[in-house]
Image (cartoon, helix red, strand yellow):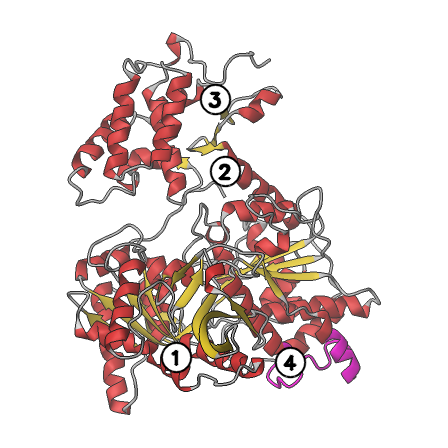
């Protein structure tokens, strides 16, 4: 049985060859230096201090591991990969700037503190009762559940977790594996007929298989599925057809329609999905037909349309968030009463939210994830969609899966996607590979391919590796500029190199905000009639959404703080904004940074401050500032909010790339900082590029910084 002693008791003297900390304060003072150097957070040091206080003779290698697992969590990792930490110590302490005067000393101290071997480190960790060792056989004991750290993973790849993150990960894996075991039987004849109605035969004999059709079939037979793909590949179209298939099969059996809920991580993403699905289900949409899917009458088609939901909510609202709490109304003891949950923009969902979502689902509830696996991962810890889709490009379908797909869909999956050893997860993942929005061999599509995969489109369905990615990127921009000049059109790609925040080219770019400000001034109603005010606000919001400046950082001249001020001052000089003092002024765009349930505003919602005509207490006409937000339901309805009620908002002339996820703009301009930063990655560039629908501008200052960003890929550590 497990001995009854403190969780922080030290091991016996023979347990470790490393001497205990003789002067804990000296070790903690080193950690304090790391905090001041920006290498770790004060929180990381506080955890180490607590452990040392509980056990003054704690092995320094254990204390270091605890500091590092906390530091890794702060940078989005779920756990500390011990082997990788020893092999690549330069990846640790990500907050430490390479050019910092403290960097050489901190790196030297880290190297000296790291153990000589993986076995030595793992042995030291396994000796402490505060760490639950999954590699050892432990009798069932309630005290095990109290251990704050967990050593798990594989023998060849041991991972150290804070218990909370280990529990989240286990819950996700259990929930997914349980659903993967639920192989649902589909009626062959009806499924074939419905899929044929939803997906007419392609006329291009050289085309790839219809991956949307394949995605529908695979998702229809599984309790868990993932549909991933880049922008414009048809993820939304596919899921609407999938829901039409499932509802039609249900209705044909004389059963009640399935209860389906649609959700997204942010209010903006939810509004976009809502609008997209509503437009597809509109009866006047001739490009999206459900005729013949469920019966041949107009009445039957309408029944099917109404059974497919278009209302999309945020995940927080779906689960019933409790104000000022991490808990939700829906959980294992009070699950959501639904049959299917669809989550869009799943790359934005962190590990905690994914675990809580699975906790709130009944065992038989299906879960369908949609998203672009190559986008930035969530702001908080975890990259769940990326982890699940790590092999999506070369997905391994078993021969039985390929044979079943041929029977049900008539599609022949290429042999290089076949693998007799393909795991259960691979049989539930589909990657949509053709963009209907961008051509891969030109413009934004080619740029996204180059940045994301380092590939150049050399011929249809044929790519080649770019030998010099930075030069290839510059050439791509130059080619687009030349083509635009020949056609006398505006280029879809624009590359601007600047040297200071006052560069004329930068301020010329800021004129992209002129249209919404000009419309705001020219169309301002003189009446207080609500319909006119709402129409004006909707037009201003729509015009604002045509252009957006993006940045990687929050602080500094090239973060949102510096850029927002720079853009505002530029627009004042250009005569488009009034030179007013104070936080609130007409034309100020604001971004909600925290869910506000009383105002029905979600994190990510964008509003515009407008001067609205009204009467004062004496009945005299005046104008007063109000902030207009779209209702977020796909309609043109507007919510008007007093500025004084908006506490958790920030100006959003410039927006971080993270915050832009789930949004699209006609023209996006990504501004890179002058110095290297760990947040500058392939994923950040790719996400910024793919926010653009028609035009993308890249603003940079330093070739080396741009080249580093193109070479650096996010690799969040987890056990998924």
Vertical side of 540 occupied by 180: above or below: above
From the viewer's perspective, is the residue at label 3 or at label 1 nearer? 1
Earlier in the chain: of badge 3 and badge 4, it is 3
Q: Position of residue 547 (x, y in %)?
A: 37, 75
Whether residue 3 appears in this view of the structure is: yes
Q: Nearer the viewer, residue 368 or 265?
A: 265
Earlier in the chain: of badge 4 and badge 2, it is 2
From the viewer's perspective, is the residue at label 4 or at label 1 nearer? 1
Q: Residue furthest right?
A: 254
* Disc 1 target residue: 516
Label 4 with label 1: CB-CB less than 8 Å? no
> Pointer 4: residues within 10 angstroms few (<14), some, or many (20+)?
few
Q: Quadrant of residue 184?
A: bottom right
Q: Residue at x 45, y 76 (%)?
A: 623
* Disc 4 target residue: 282
> Pointer 1: residues within 10 angstroms few (<14), some, or many (20+)?
many
Q: CA distance from mark 3 to mark 2?
A: 16 Å
Q: Which mark is residue 165?
A: 2
Q: Position of residue 122 (x, y in %)?
A: 40, 24
Q: CA distance from mark 4 to mark 1?
A: 29 Å
Q: CA distance from mark 3 to mark 1?
A: 58 Å
* Disc 3 target residue: 130
Q: Residue at x 56, y 82 (%)?
A: 529
Q: CA distance from mark 4 to mark 2?
A: 43 Å
Q: Position of residue 556 (x, y in %)?
A: 25, 55
Secondary structure beneath label 1? helix
Q: Nearer the viewer, residue 534 or 130?
A: 534
Secondary structure beneath label 3? loop
Q: Quadrant of residue 80?
A: top left
> Pointer 2: residues within 10 angstroms few (<14), some, or many (20+)?
many
């Amino acid at each position: 049985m497990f001995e009854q002693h403190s969780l922080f008791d030290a091991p016996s003297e023979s347990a470790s060859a490393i001497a205990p900390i003789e002067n804990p304060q000296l070790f903690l003072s080193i950690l304090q230096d790391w905090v001041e150097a920006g290498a770790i957070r004060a929180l990381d040091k506080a955890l180490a201090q607590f452990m040392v206080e509980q056990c003054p003779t704690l092995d320094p290698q254990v204390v270091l591991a605890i500091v590092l697992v906390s530091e890794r969590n702060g940078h989005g990792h779920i756990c500390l990969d011990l082997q990788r930490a020893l092999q690549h110590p330069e990846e640790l302490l990500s907050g430490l700037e390479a050019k910092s005067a403290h960097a050489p000393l901190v790196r030297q101290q880290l190297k000296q503190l790291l153990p000589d071997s993986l076995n030595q480190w793992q042995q030291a960790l396994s000796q402490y009762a505060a760490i639950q060792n999954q590699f050892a056989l432990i009798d069932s004991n309630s005290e095990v559940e109290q251990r704050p750290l967990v050593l798990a993973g594989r023998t060849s790849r041991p991972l150290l977790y804070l218990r909370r993150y280990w529990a989240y990960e286990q819950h996700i894996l259990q929930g997914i594996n349980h659903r993967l075991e639920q192989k649902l039987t589909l009626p062959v004849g009806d499924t074939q007929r419905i899929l044929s109605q939803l997906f007419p035969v392609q006329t291009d004999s050289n085309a790839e298989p219809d991956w949307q059709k394949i995605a529908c079939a695979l998702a229809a037979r599984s309790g868990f599925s993932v549909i991933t793909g880049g922008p414009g590949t048809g993820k939304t179209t596919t899921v609407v057809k999938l829901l039409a298939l499932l509802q039609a099969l249900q209705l044909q059996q004389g059963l009640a329609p399935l209860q389906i809920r649609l959700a997204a991580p942010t209010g903006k993403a939810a509004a976009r999905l809502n609008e997209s699905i509503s437009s597809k289900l509109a009866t006047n949409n001739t490009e999206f037909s459900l005729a013949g899917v469920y019966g041949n009458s107009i009445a039957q088609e309408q029944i099917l349309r109404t059974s497919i939901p278009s209302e999309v909510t945020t995940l927080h609202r779906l689960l019933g968030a409790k104000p000022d709490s991490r808990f939700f109304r829906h959980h294992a003891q009070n699950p959501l009463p639904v049959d299917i949950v669809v989550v869009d923009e799943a790359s934005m969902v962190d590990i905690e939210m994914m675990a809580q979502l699975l906790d709130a689902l009944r065992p038989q509830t299906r879960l369908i994830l949609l998203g672009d696996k190559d986008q930035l991962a969530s702001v908080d810890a975890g990259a769940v969609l990326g982890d699940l889709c790590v092999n999506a490009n070369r997905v391994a379908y078993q021969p039985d899966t390929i044979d079943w797909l041929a029977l049900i869909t008539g599609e022949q999956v290429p042999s290089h996607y076949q693998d007799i050893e393909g795991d259960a997860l691979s049989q539930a993942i589909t990657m949509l590979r053709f963009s209907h929005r961008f051509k891969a061999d030109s413009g934004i599509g080619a740029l996204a391919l180059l940045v994301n995969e380092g590939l150049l489109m050399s011929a249809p369905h044929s790519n080649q590796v770019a030998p010099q990615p930075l030069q290839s990127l510059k050439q791509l921009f130059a080619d687009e500029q030349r083509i635009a000049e020949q056609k006398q059109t505006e280029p879809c790609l624009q590359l601007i190199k600047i040297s200071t925040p006052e560069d004329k080219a930068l301020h010329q770019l800021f004129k992209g905000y002129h249209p919404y400000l000009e419309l705001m001034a020219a169309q301002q109603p003189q009446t207080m009639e609500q319909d006119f005010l709402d129409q004006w606000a909707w037009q201003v919001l729509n015009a604002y959404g045509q252009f957006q400046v993006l940045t990687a950082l929050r602080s500094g001249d090239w973060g949102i703080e510096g850029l927002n001020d720079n853009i505002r001052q530029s627009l004042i000089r250009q005569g488009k904004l009034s030179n007013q003092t104070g936080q609130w002024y007409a034309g100020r765009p604001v971004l909600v940074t925290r869910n506000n349930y009383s105002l029905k505003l979600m994190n990510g919602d964008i509003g515009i401050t407008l001067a609205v005509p009204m009467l004062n207490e004496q009945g005299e006409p005046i104008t007063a500032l109000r902030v207009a937000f779209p209702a977020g339901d796909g309609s043109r309805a507007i919510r008007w909010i007093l500025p004084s009620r908006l506490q958790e908002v920030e100006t959003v002339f410039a927006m971080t790339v993270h915050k832009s996820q789930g949004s699209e703009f006609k023209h996006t301009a990504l501004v890179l900082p002058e110095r290297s930063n760990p947040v500058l990655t392939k994923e950040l560039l790719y996400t910024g590029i793919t926010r653009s629908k028609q035009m993308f501008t890249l603003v940079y200052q330093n070739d080396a910084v741009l080249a580093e960003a193109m070479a650096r890929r996010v690799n969040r550590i987890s056990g998924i």
